[in-house]
Image (cartoon, helix red, strand yellow):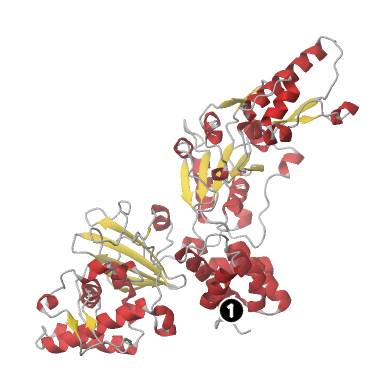
Amino acid sequence: MAKTPLYQTWSWKRSLPEPFDTEEPVSTTIYSRYCMTPTKKSTLHSASLSAILAYMEMDTSVTPGSTSESAFGTQGEKLISEYQSRTGEIHAVVFNKTNRKFTAGRFDIADPSSNAKVYSIKDSGNTGTALFFTLIPLAMEDDEFKEQYDALATCKDAGYPDMEKADEAAYVLCDNLYRRIENADSLGNDGIKISIPNTGNVQQLTPLNLNKGTYSPTSVLFGNFRIFKPGAKAAASVSIDKNHFCGQYSFSNRVFSQKEQLLIPKLEDWYIIPPEADSICKHAKMTTSGTQPMRNFLLRGPAGTGKTEAAKAIAAGLGLPYLFYTCSANTEIFDLLGQMLPDTEGTALAESGELPSLMDIQMDPPSAYYKLTGQYEDSITEEEVYDKLIEIIGLQAKQSEDGKPQGGQHFRYVETPLIQAIRNGYVLEIQEPTVIANPGVLVGLNGLLDRCASVVLPTGETVKRHPDTVIIVTTNINYAGCRDLNQSIISRMNLVIDMDAPDTDTLVSRVVNITGCTDTSTVVEMAKTVQEINEHCRETMINDGSCGVRELISWVQSYMVCGSVLESADYTVLSSASSDPENRAEIYSTCLEGKFAA
């Protein structure tokens, strides 16, 4: 069974490109130097051979004055290509040499500005030719591949007068590429390590990343790009002046109190403002004068991609106070709206426990209901008990107004950050709503996400949403305990932005500034290793831990203390990546061993 979807069984059965379509596809006498099996043979592979021939058509050193519609360029550690397929589409591909991942999309030639369609490697889908096409410069770092590439190019340029010689070059090229990809783990630097999901669905290019220049080739080697925008650096590496950014997008002339001013975030010197934060601020400000200003935003992505820091940066850019609310599996609607807490001021009865606390209600609803009513009902819910508590508190309040004596526990209402932000027009971050066990909790807040929204508090007060209120929902994806966000919530988000992991340059800059580590070259290797660990965990389904920016920061700090990269890794990135000793040993041997001195 193939280790990568590029070499699935069906891929060997596809018709070969001309002029090899009439040739014998298997040779037992000609093969690459990487053929180590007892039975020696090589097989012509349609997708990889098509990619090699297409690259030659574009390569001006082989085809002077080339009119190929394909293009190739680089951006740091990224190989970037646009391959024009036989089906009349442009297949745009990015290969990141650091994490070995592909990002791709299919575009209509007639409308290159349209959104990307999924690139999926399957018998009824895409052959993978565009991915092989992107790997050719990496393949040519091998002397054998480069020698046979030149030999086949000579045959092609001459019109294939000697098919026997062309066949020999084709056999070696296909076998060389196949074995260096499939056996990459055992070939060291000669191997070509790639990472493609077993489903064959390659990570999709997003309009946001295309528009902001994340994959803009800074060096164009061949052709003219139509999808990517050459010449620009990735926006993630562009520095935005913090002093200029803070308050730049303010859409309100309100004067805040001293206490409120303390809630407006101050951005740290080490912080690099992401383009997503700048974009959200622009949308919020520029739509303010419209009939439906944009005030609801969703940021989602893996842990450590900076979603919470981005939410704070948005508040700083808008010049608004920032509050947050962190959800949990047990979060209920009344947790979001406010809590009735025992009033410990001026009464000794607050500790009497005559009325159940919120913890009592959450832990044992039937017992809490019995304490309130003297009736024990097994099927009673938390919401029903809470409603009964509010009813009794209301009766106590009425008795107090009538001048009648009252005893027992006194309660007072305490606003949550959500209500404070709604009432006063702040920026509110709702963290991790996908962990809430009850899917109907956030749906209960749909009214607050609409225009002219209002909510009724447990006290009976109706609070209208302040027009300046900005709600930012931040959530992880594909983590244990996370559920899909309800569609009615997503539909009320004005912008839904997927936060990608920062590129290596941005990541290293952030970590160096936070930790103060001056050994930048080592931090670069540590950052690359964290990306490799992440990729390894995804491939091997190790999902009981996390290894991201936070773990990298801890690793670098520990390295600064003990002076050993490997020793500090034991208690930071390795222990965080998995709690299973066998998994940690596998990660160590695959991603760490041999890379750093002990």
> Residue 472 falls in which quadrant of the image?
top right
Describe residue 529's horizontal placement relative to residue 399 as left or right.
Answer: left
Q: Which residue is mark 1?
A: 521
> Image height check: is 455 above or below 227?
above
Describe residue 253's horizontal placement relative to residue 346 as left or right.
Answer: left
Viewer-proximal residue among 144 and 593: 593
* Quadrant assignment for the N terminus: bottom left
* Image position, residue 142 (x, y; %): 35, 86
Given the image, on which type of amino acid does mark 1 rest? Ser
Describe residue 16's horizontal placement relative to residue 75 as left or right.
Answer: left
* Quadrant assignment for the C terminus: bottom right
Is disc 1 surrounded by few (<14), some (14 to 19) or many (20+) residues within 10 Å?
Answer: few
Instruction: Report the label total.
Output: 1
* Image position, residue 413 (x, y; %): 74, 28
> Residue 11 falls in which quadrant of the image?
bottom left
* Image position, residue 434 (x, y; %): 54, 44
Q: Residue at x 64, y 66 (%)?
A: 553
* Image position, residue 40 (x, y; %): 26, 87
Residue 168 in sight: yes
Viewer-proximal residue among 454 and 435: 435
> Image height check: is 408 above or below 261?
above
Q: Residue at x 82, y 14 (%)?
A: 400
